[in-house]
Image: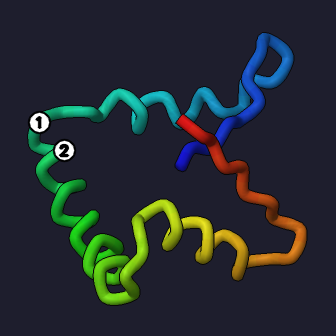
Amino acid sequence: MAIQNRYSMMARWHEVLFPVLEEFTAEAMDQNQKLLALPQDMAREKNATLAQLSLAWMLCKKPWIVPIRWNL
């Protein structure tokens, strides 16, 4: 899943997120793997993929949220 934010010379308010995006260290990746255990367990319990779980979660949030599905 990805979120695309508007970013240009005229719309620079997302620059405050740049420090967060630069934190891809080996230690952070290990911590993120631990966080992924919860949705992986939930998907396994429901006999679903992580993508299916993610789409179901998005569809239940608000009626005007439209998830974009990518076929890779």
Instruction: List x then y, in percent, for residue 49.
Output: 41, 67
* Mark 2 secondary-structure assignment: helix
Q: Relative to the observer, which residue lies in front, 9 or 63?
A: 63
Q: Measuring 66% from the left and 49% from the top, which residue is drawn there?
A: 69
Please tell me which residue is depicted at 65% across the width and 33% down the height of the picture.
Answer: 14
Label 2: which residue? Answer: 29
User: Mark 1 highlights which residue?
Assistant: 26
Q: CA distance from mark 2 to mark 1?
A: 5 Å
Residue 65: give x, y in percent of width and height: 81, 64
Q: Residue furthest bottom?
A: 45
What amino acid does circle 2 point to?
Answer: Met
- State yes or no: discs 2 and 1 in contact (Cβ < 8 Å): yes
Say few, some or many: other residues with alpha carbon within 10 Å of mark 2 (under 14 / 14 to 19 / 20 or more): few
Against 15, residue 4 (above or below) is below
Q: Residues within 10 Å of mark 1 (few under 14, many from 20)?
A: few
In the image, residue 56 above or below residue 65? below
Task: Report the amino acid beneath label 1.
Answer: Ala
Compared across the picture, whether 43 is left or right of 51 comes to: left
